[in-house]
Every structure is written in C-alpha cells, then in structure tokens.
Image (cartoon, coloured by chain):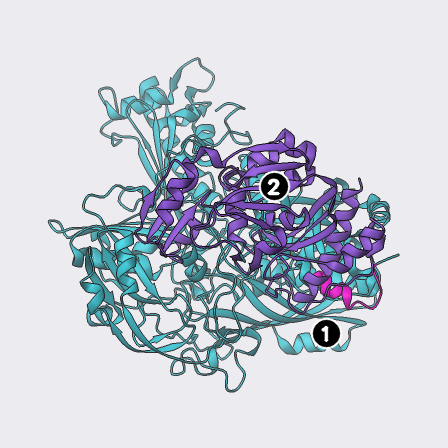
Chain colours: A purple, B cyan
Amino acid sequence: MYDFAYHRPKSVADAVALLKGKEEARPMSGGMTLIPTLKQRLARPSDVVDLGGIKELAGIKVEGNNVVIGGMTRHYDVASSADVKAQIPALASLAGHIGDPAVRNRGTMGGSVANNDPAADYPAAVVALNATVTTTTGKHTADDFFKGLFETALGEGELITSISFPKAEKAAYVKFPNPASRYAMVGVFVAKTASGVRVAVTGAGPCVFRVKAMEDALAKNFSSAAIKDIKVPADDLNNDIHGSAEYRAHLVGVMARRAVDAANK
Amino acid sequence: MTAETGIGARVKRKEDQRFLTGTGRYVDDLPLARATYAYFLRSPHAHAKIKSIDVSAAKSMPGVVEIFTGKDIADAKVGGLICGWVVKDKHGEPHKAPPHPVMALDTVRYVGDTVAMVVAGSHDEAKDAAEAIHVDYDVKPANVDLARAFDKGVPEVHAAEAPGNLIYDWEIGVKADVEAAFAKAAHVTRMDIVNNRLIPNAMEPRAAAAEYDKGTGNYTLWSTSQNPHVLRLILSAFVLGIPEHKLRVIAPDVGGGFGSKIFCYNEETMVCWAASRVGRPIKWTAERAESFMTDAHGRDHVTHAELALDKDHKFLALKVETIANMGAYLSTFSTAVPTYLYATLLAGQYTTPVIYANVKAALTHTAPVDAYRGAGRPEATFVIESIVSKAAAELKVDPAELRRKNFIPSDAFPYQTPVALQYDSGNYPPIIDEAIKIADYKGFESRRAEAKSRGKLRGIGFSSYIEACGLGPSRVIGQLGGGVGQWESAQIKFNPTGNVQVLTGAHSHGQSHETTFAQLVSDKLGIPIETVEVIHGDTATTPFGMGSYGSRSLAVGGSAIMKAADKIIAKGKKIAAHLMEASVADVVFENGNFKVAGTDKTVPLGAAVFAAYVPHNYPLEELEPGMDENAFYDPSNFVYPAGTQICEVEIDPDTGVVEVVNHTAVDDFGNIINPMIVEGQVHGGIVQGVGQALLENAVYDKETGQLLSGSYMDYTMPRADDVPSFKLGNTVTPCPHNPLGVKGCGEAGAIAAPAAVMNAVHDALAPLGVTHVPMPATPLTVWQLIQSAPRAAAG
C-alpha cells in the first residue's frame, strides 16, 4: 500500500475535525473494504482516520418501536444481539451471513452502508425496513441515502453515527450468493412495517433498488403467490461471467418469493 | 514395527505438529541478512510490441538497488526456459519450439508476461519503482479463443517459429482401422467436449529467494519447487550455466503444488541470476494476483469424440480429435500432457479394440498451460466416461451395465491396450460392484422421486477411471521424448545411537511423505517410528532425485526406500553373524532383531548399527564400517490405479444450482500404507474434480485477452460447503512389479470426479430433454439450459 497518515481519534468530534478540509482523507470503520483496497494500491488516501477507538459509535439499543444501531457496531454484534433477534430477526440473520467470521468480527454496519457496495447486504435492509440514517450532520431517509454505485448522500467528512430500524411485523432476507465471492449476486429483503410493505434488492443492479410492483401486490396479499407473475426488467441490471442481466432479473423473482415465504413462517 | 505405526496403520501425520502450530518454514519465512526484494513488472496486455522501456525515473526511486529488463538478460546471454519433452508430430518431426525468454525482449504474449524486475530494499519500494517504469506498448490483437486458434487471420503468438499457432499435429493409433470399425458400427455416439481451463491455486504462492556467496562462487536458491534437483539441472544445464555443483536448490516446506510447482519459471530464474549481480540476497513471493496470472494453468482442451458400438453394445472403436492449449510459451512438460499422458489413456477400463486420437497443440495469448493434478489423465477420463454415459443414455441401457459389459476381463492382465500402454494388473468388476453397493444405486429411483416431490431434479453419474502413474521405465520415457530419467533415489543413514535419517529424492508439499515413508522404514526395519526422520528437498543433502508429481512418490520413491532398507538388512546380517559367531546364511531378520534360526541367539538392529560405527568387534577385513545405504529404483512399468466414482446431484430448477448430495469413490490403489492419508488424498482430489465440474473456470476476455477470473472474487474455488461427506471404499490388486505392491493415489480423485459429476448433471436434466451441459455446470449455465430446454422442469 501507499504511505498515509494514520489517526485513531477517541471521539466523533475529533474524527470530524481530523477529516475536515482534507479532500483525500478517508474514514475507516471495520476496514474490510478499505484495507484490501489499500493493499492492492487501488486507493491512495492522504490520511486514514480509524473510527475504531470511538466507543460512543458502537452499540445497540431499543428506542420505542425502533432498534438503533451505532455506526461502529460489528456484524457479529448485530447477529448475536438479543434485541435485534427479538425485534427484527431478519436483520440479525442478514448480519450473520455477511462475509465470513473474520469479516463479521471486524466489519461494521456504518462502514458497509457508507461504502454502498452494490453487492453489500445491509443496504437492502436499510431500504426495505425504511430505516433512518443519522450522521454527524443530520438525518437521511433510506430512500434518499443510496444514490448509485458506491455513492451515498454522505457529504465530505460526514460520518454515520447510527441507523434506526423500525420494528417489522414481517421480514426476511434471502440472497443468492455469487458462487466465487459469495457476495450477494441477488439479495432481496422483504419487510412489512408500519410504513407498509417494501421489497429492496441488492446485488442485482448498480445500487439497491425497490420493486414497486411487488410492494403493491404484497400490500394487498402478503404471499409469494401474489408476486409469482411479476417480472423485473433486466435492462439496468449487472451482467458478468457469473450472471447475465436476465438471470439476475429472474433471480430477483425467485429470491423475493422465497423471502416472502420465509417472512410468513 | 507395531500394528499402530506399521504398514496399513492410520498413523497421524508427523508433519502436522509444525504445520498446525504455525512453525512450518516456507521460502517466505527465510531470514536472510541484507535481503533485497524483487518485484516483477508485468504486461497489462495480452499481445503487444514493446517499443521502449524507460527505467530512468524508477532507478532513482528510494531503496532501488537494480532494475533489469529483457535487454539485460539478452546481453548477459542467459538462456531461455526449456520444454523438457520433445513430442514428435505425425510426420516424425519434433514439435515447434518457440523461444521462451525469462524476460520479454520486444514482445509480450500474455497478460502477466514478465517485462522488468525491480530489486529494492523492501517489497513496497520495489513496487513503487515498478510503477515509475514507463513502457511504451504497441498493442496488437490477441488470440485467446482456443477453438479458433488455427483459423486463418488469427493473430500468431510466435509467427516465425510456429506459423499458424501450431506446435504439433500428433496422432496415435491406426486411423484406417478405426474408420473400418466405424463402418461396421450398429450405433455411433458423438460428442463435443470442452475441458475447461483451471488455475491451480496452491495455498502457498510461488516464492523464490537466492543468495550468492562471493567467496566460494556458490549460489543457493530456495524455491517452492516440487522437484528441486530437476530445477537445478534445468537452471544449470540449459538456462543460467551455473555448474550444478555450484548451485544448491532448497525446496523447504511447500504449501501445495498440484503440478504447478514442477516447472522452471521466469521469476526463480531471475532471482537466482540477479543475486550475484546485486551482491545481496534477493527474495520474491508472488502476490495472489500474480499466481492467478502466471502459475501454469491446467486442462483447456476442445475435443470431438466418437464411440462406435456393435449391436450387443460392445465398444468397437473410439475416435478422438483434440485441440490442446499450450498458452503463449511452452512450459517445462507442456507438450507431453495432451499426448503421452492423455491419448495413451483413452482405452480406460475397456476392451475397445481400436482407438485413434489426433491432438493438435495450439499457441494462444494466455498463460502457459502444463500439468495440473492428473495432467492429461483427467482429460482422457472425461472424454471416455462422458461418451460412455452418453452412449448408455442414447441406447437406453444402464450405464453401469454398459461399463461392465466392456470392462477388460479380470483374467486378461497384463493387458495390452491399442494406445501403447500395457496395464500390469487390474480387477475392475469388484470395484464398480462395491461402489454400487456403497452408493445404494438400487435405491436411486426412489430418491429421485422423493427429490421431485420437493421440486428438485436428481441425477446419478458414473465414472470408471484408469490412471497410469509412477512413470517409468526411464528407457521408455526416453523413447517417447522425455528429457529426464524417471527413477527415484533413497538413502537410509543410521546414526550411531540407532536413530535414522531417510533421505529421499521425492518431495513432499502436502503428500505426507514424512509419515508414510517413516512407516515404511519403521515397519521394514522394526524400529520405532519416532526414531525415523524423513528428509527431502535440499540438493546439498539429499541424493539426486526426480521429485514428486504424477502420483509417483510411493510407487517409485517408496520402492527406492525399500531397496535401501534391504541393503541395510543385508549388511546388518553380516555384522550380526560376526557378533553371534554364526554363518550369514543362518541369520534371519525379524521385528528388528537378527537371529540365528533355531537358537536363542539374537542381536538387535541397534546393536549391529552401533558395532558398525564403533567397530571394535567387527569383521573389518570383509566389511566397511558405517550403516548408510543408498538405492536407486527405476520402475519396470507405470502403475495403474483404477476406480469407480458415483455422484448424485440435485438441481434447483428455479436457480440452476447443482448440489452434490452424494459422492462415492471406490479405488484400487494396490496395497495401502496409511489409509487415513490415502483418504485425505482422495478427498482433496474429488474436491478439485467437483471444482472443475461445477465451479472453476479460467476465463480470458475474447476481445482484450484480459484474465476475467483473476481473483477469488471471480474464480470459484470449491469450499467445504460445496461438497458432501464422501463415501469411500477400496479393493486391493497389488502392483506386481514394485516391492510394496503399491499404486498411486494422489490424482485419482481429480481424474474421476468431473465425469461422475457431469454425468449426474446430464442425468438430472435428461427428463427436460437437455442433451449437453458444458463444464463447469454453473448456476447460470444450468439455468439457461433449463430455460431453453424442450420440456419444462415443473411437474
């Protein structure tokens, strides 16, 4: 990797101060994407601001009908949290199937959501559950947060402090892993919350997206039969040696039906 | 010595103590004082002319010691890398042999081709400097499509030396006889097969370190080699010209090879050569991306095959046309793999009376292709076992019965095949019987029906393989164009206190020689296994040997050890006779003791050894002191393991995912020394075979020649959850021509599994009217076939 200045602040305020005015500075949470990127010399930050020393950013609490998860909370902690398992078991299950044990013990929710990898799992949960992303500068709704391929609403130096997930009446996440990388080739999170039914798809396109037709059908009848004939257009989906756009479009339907069935169990 | 540690015992691996506690010593672990680090700048293009290389900026970068380019190598008159097997084409002409420079001079021929070597004080400094080297390329169109490599107008890889990309046009068998047999056939099965290209992916990447001793003029090269003596021979005699006795090659602990570490590569050659110029030791370890790009790849055939059968379903003839990919340069044994290790195996376990095979070797703008676990034999088995199962499906007969009907009868051994090999021994019917029993073949249709009730398509597939391994005799290898002998060496060196060093010319990079060979010596000499140390991998301490590949270590190397042990016993008898004042003829050796038959006189082996080193009471007039014997063993034939695998898969028609739900393997490896280690070899082999059938595929972009599957993000390595627990069985037909009665087990799993899995996939999809599934049967491929199938999956 290239040389960079390394910082490990103790507070959010210090982290923000360290990032301020440095265009090439990068915050690092779990580092599960950033460190391999650095090792392969695909990024050349001037500064790396390690958020690992900021205790206030990690933790899970229940506030009314919401589960609020700190940005630096590790996937393992989400997966094994009694609160998450009780309130939104689908989210705990999703976290328990990210990467491998090493990744789950290092990677964080905030890091994953901020990175917005098109094949990441969490964005599907954030969108389907209509979560609210709280940052050092304000709040973002899920629908406004994810902007495109590796693009989010986060401004320069803006850090995710927590994400608030409304409790779901029914929810499930089913993914079809890429055979090689095991990232989601298609992952579908289906949720029925106070704000209605949402179907969010990750892995298939350049960015997480919702399938309105399925949401409408499921709102009327929350069963896999209700979406049996709904086809997702392949036009804007990813196409690579593991899956054509048509295959991914087809898998969205299969995974969505399986997710609905799982949510109904 | 005892039932717990002797031949046939499941002795736990001696080497695991260090491997599992992180105390193994690999090339990269070497602490070398004043070491420098090499980094290789590689071609980003599949085919380009190098117009210029400017290293001036890079040379002044921090820490840079030296930068070498192809011109430096050419100026120093370093030889090119060699291909060590001369295959003669169908006109008797030797194969085309384009040059293989250790560093590209004016042309790069695949993505990853070596362009410059930077030596610096650290790996990062070397890499920084490499980024500052400016290479001006004139990018040319590339040829990475094997099936079209000989087409008119396809870019040539070595236009002058190998026009039209043809390395050889080779054949075996009598074409006219085969055509005559086809003319009489009641049924002909035809098949087009692509044997997908694989990337070996040893856990430890290739690495090299070299040191030059100015005082003595001696070089030491540490390399991740499967055969350090052969590497030294090639570097000395053909490439670097360093006299053999001035070059020591050490292959310490090596983390897997699978064939890819047999060959002599650019990087270790450069590291060794540059060590004397730099005047400091040089270390290099491949990054994983470099391994993907530059380790010799495996397989990669395009084949058309036809099988003729008579009205009773007896095989009449087999005709095979294959194009084999060589890549951009001929790697060390590349030419032999698709000829003598492939076409000679096309009889399989069957009495097919006439066989004709034509193999054309092609150059492409891809990494060199060479031996990979099985090397030619998996490709042959895939052709035979695919077409036999296809014939069974076409004729609507049981695939096991069709095989059984055509097996070489058990009383027909030794059996001369129509493709040169003479099988020494074999007994195939009991193998398939045992496999059918273990796999509960009879119960399959009810399992298929049960799977259908869950919406799954279930299929079953057979693969009955033959392997020829433990190559030899050397005379025959020489006649076929091989450049080296195929014997193995051993030395048994007792120390005065009675413990033993066993030195072998074979090399263990996962095969467990330190345990298996110790079992042999412990058993044969009746000494505790703890007192036996197996040593390998250092040309300065071990006798010249050929290394490990082609499932040869036990059949050839183990036989050499047995010969050396016989010499130890023979000498010990003379010493014991002297000590017991008996005639040598009356001395017998049992359980570690020399005895005079019919008396209670006894001398333990340890006492004879001690007398040999402290010869105070010793027949010095007739016998040299010391207890140190060596032996060389040249096999009189190959060994011929055989077996049957039965695979059962379930396919999810909604996603195209193929799940291996049952996999049975029954092998005849002759006598077995350590069943646990043999099972481990079979497990690993099957996983690699399942990997080829369902997961692994090296893909080059047809337009740009870029390697698309160049990391674990895109190259699907099999994982533990991709396979079920295997069900294994074995039968024993001892090899009649080696002292242990053993065959080889290292490659069998990988040889048989692809056809077993693919036949199961075909069987599962047959109800839909799908007749051909290309390998690997990835979810995408299977789903697409289901979409376009004549009949729907539902129902």
Q: Name the amino acid type tagged 2.
A: Ser
Residue nearest the viewer, comparing B60 with B277 = B60
Pinpoint residue B223: horizontal percent, then vertical percent.
33, 50
Q: Which mark is residue A164?
A: 2
Residue B230 x %, y %:
35, 54
- Residue beneath the point at 45% across and 80% down: B141
Looking at the image, the residue that sits furthest to the top is: B600
**Image position of B513 with respect to B74: above or below:** above
Q: Which residues are magenta?
A: B782-793
* Residue A232: % across, % down: 73, 63
Residue drawn where x is 23% and y is 59% of the image = B273
Give the residue at x 37% y 67%. Answer: B113
Q: Identify the mark at residue B181; answer none if there is no mark.
A: 1
Q: Position of residue B177 (x, y in %)?
A: 67, 75
Q: Secondary structure at mark 2?
A: strand
**Number of other residues with Cα within 10 Å of mark 2, as a class: few under 14, some 14 to 19, many 20 or more:** many
